[in-house]
Image (cartoon, rainbow, N blue to C red):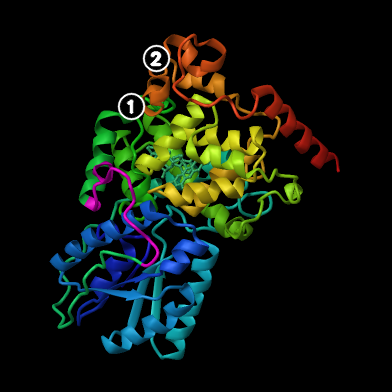
Amino acid sequence: MWFRSDLRVNDNPALTRACVESDDGVVAVFCICPTQWREAHHWGDAKAGFVMRSLAALRDRLESLRIPLKIVETDEFSSVPGALVELARSTKCDRLYFNREYEWNERERDEAVVEAFDDAGLNTLSFDDQVLFEPGSVLTKSSNSFYSVYSPFKKACWKRYNDELAEGNDWAVLDMPKKANAIEIEGDEIPDQIDGFGEADIDWDLWPAGEKAALNRMRAFVRHRIGDYKESRDFPARDETSRVSAYLASGVLSPKQCMRAALDANGDRIDGGNPGAVGWMEEILWREFYRHVLVGFPRVSRDRNFNADYDGLAWRDAPEDLDAWKAGRTGYPIVDAAMRCLTKTGWMHNRLRMIVAMFLTKHLLIDWREGEKHFMKHLVDGDLAANNGGWQWSASTGTDAQPYFRIFNPTSQSEKFDPDGAFIRAWVPELCDVTGKAIHEPHRNAKVDLNGYPQPIVGQKEGRERALGVFKAHRGA
Ligand SMILES: Cc1cc2nc3c(=O)[nH]c(=O)nc-3n(C[C@H](O)[C@H](O)[C@H](O)COP(=O)(O)OP(=O)(O)OC[C@H]3O[C@@H](n4cnc5c(N)ncnc54)[C@H](O)[C@@H]3O)c2cc1C
C-alpha cells in the first residue's frame, strides 16, 4: 500500500482493498522526495513538518493493523518507479495499491510507476479517495466537458448525490480495515530530519497530528459550530471555521468523512435544511471543483493562467513591494496582520487569503505565481488545487474568477470583517495604542505613535487605478 496524500487508515479505499485482498499480509510504503517537494512543489517547513508528523501518527495506526511502514527516500519523483519495484521485489509483494493524485507531476509519476510494475510483471490498483466524484464524471450537459464555473458544478454534484441517495447509496464511509495477517518485515523509523527542511517556527499545538485529532476537530465543529457557519465564517477574529484544511490536504481526513458528518447533522440533505451545514458542504465542493479543474485543465498545475487571455499581462517586477507584503509591512493593517499570522501559525483565514491575494495581484500588480509560491512555503494546508484556484480567482486569471474590475478595497474589507480591529490588534502590536475605527487606516486617523509601523507602500486609489489601467490595456490589446 503506497501512501501519499491519504495519511489515514479510516475511509481509505486503497488500504481497505489491500487488506481484504492480501492473504499474506500488507506492507505500507511512503516516499520522501525532498528535492521534488522543495523545488518543484515549493513546500516549506510547515507543510513538510505536518506531513512528517502525520506520517508518524499513521505508522502507529498501521502497527496496530500489523502493517509495517517502509520509508523510501528518492529525492525526486523520477526515481520513485525504480525504488518501488525494488521494494516490491525485496518484500515479495506482487501488487501495489494506491489512491490517485491529480496534479501534473503526480500523474506523470504514477503513469511511470504503473509502467514499471507492468514491465516487472507486477500489478497495480488505484482508487479515488481525494474526491467525492471521479474527475471526468461530473461534466457539462451542453458539451460534455469539465465545468469551469462553480455554481453549475455544485448543482450537478447535488443532483448526483440525490440520485445516488435515491438508489440507496448514502455515502457511508469505510470502516477501519481489519488486522492484516502478520508479516515478517520490519517497519522503518520516520526520519527526524529531511534534507533541505528545518523545524517550522510555528506553534504545533495548533495542528495536533493524526486522524483521531482530525476527526475530533471535524466532529466538534459539526456538533457545535456548523449551524452558525454561514453568518460567522467571514470574521477572522472569531474562530468559527473548521480548521480542517491541513488534514484534508494531507489526507488525514477524507472529504467523504466531512460530508457524511455534515449530512448526518442535516438529515441527509445536501441542498436544503440548515443553511450553515449547506454552506460548509458548499466549501467542500469548492475543494472538489478545483480538483476536477486540475484534471480537466492540467495547465493550471503547470504555472499557467487558466484564462490564456491574460498571458503576457504586464505584472510588475517589484521585489521591495513583494518583500514588504511577505513580511507584513505594507502599511495596510489587515493585510499585515494576515501575513504575519500566516508565518507564525502556518494558516490564514479564507477571507484574509482573498484580501491579501487581491492586494498583491491588484494594488501591487505582482504576478499571482509569487503569492502562490509564498503561500505554499508557509501553509500547513498547502494544496496545489485549492491554492492555485484561490490565487487565480483573486488575480482574475482563473476559473470562475473575480472580474478584474472588482477589486477589494482592503480598508473596507477590514472595517466589514474585523469591525473592532481585534484580529489586527492580535498580530500588529505596533498599533496597540490606536483606538476605535482608526485601526483600519491608522495613518489617516491616528493621533498616536505608530511605533515604527510603515506608511502604506501604495495608495489605495493609485494601486487600484494602476491595476485597472494595465488589465484594461491588456484586454484591449
Ligand atoms: C489565495 C487563496 C489560497 C488558498 N490556498 C489554499 C491551500 O493551499 N489549501 C487549502 O486547503 N485551501 C486553500 N484556500 C481555500 C481556503 O482559504 C481554505 O481551505 C480555508 O481557509 C481553510 O480553513 P478551514 O479548514 O477552517 O475551512 P472551512 O471554512 O471550515 O471549510 C471546510 C473545508 O472546505 C475546503 N475549502 C474551504 N474554502 C475553500 C476554497 N475557497 N477553495 C477550496 N477549498 C475550500 C477546505 O478543504 C476546508 O478545510 C485558499 C484560498 C485562497 C483565496
Q: Secondary structure at mark 1?
A: helix
Q: Quadrant of the N terminus?
A: bottom left
Amino acid marked by disc 2: Asp
Residue 236 inside the magenta-drawn segment: no
Instruction: Please report whichever mark, 1 or 2, sits nearer to the chain's N-terminal start.
Output: 1
The dot on residue 433 is 2
Amino acid at circle 1: Gly
Q: Is residue 137 above or below residue 395?
A: below
- Is residue 468 among what the camera can see? yes
Where, quadrant-wise, is the C terminus in this rendering? top right
* Residue 344 picture location, percent across and down: 36, 40
Residue plotted at (42% across, 77% down): 80
Which residue is found at the position 42% from the left and 18% from the top?
421
Which of the two residues, 53 or 181, is positioned nearer the viewer here?
53
From the viewer's perspective, is residue 405 above or below residue 420? below
- In the depicted view, which residue is nearer to us: 260 or 332? 332
Question: On the image, numbered disc 1 is attached to which residue?
Answer: 227
The label on residue 117 is none
Q: Residue furthest right?
A: 477
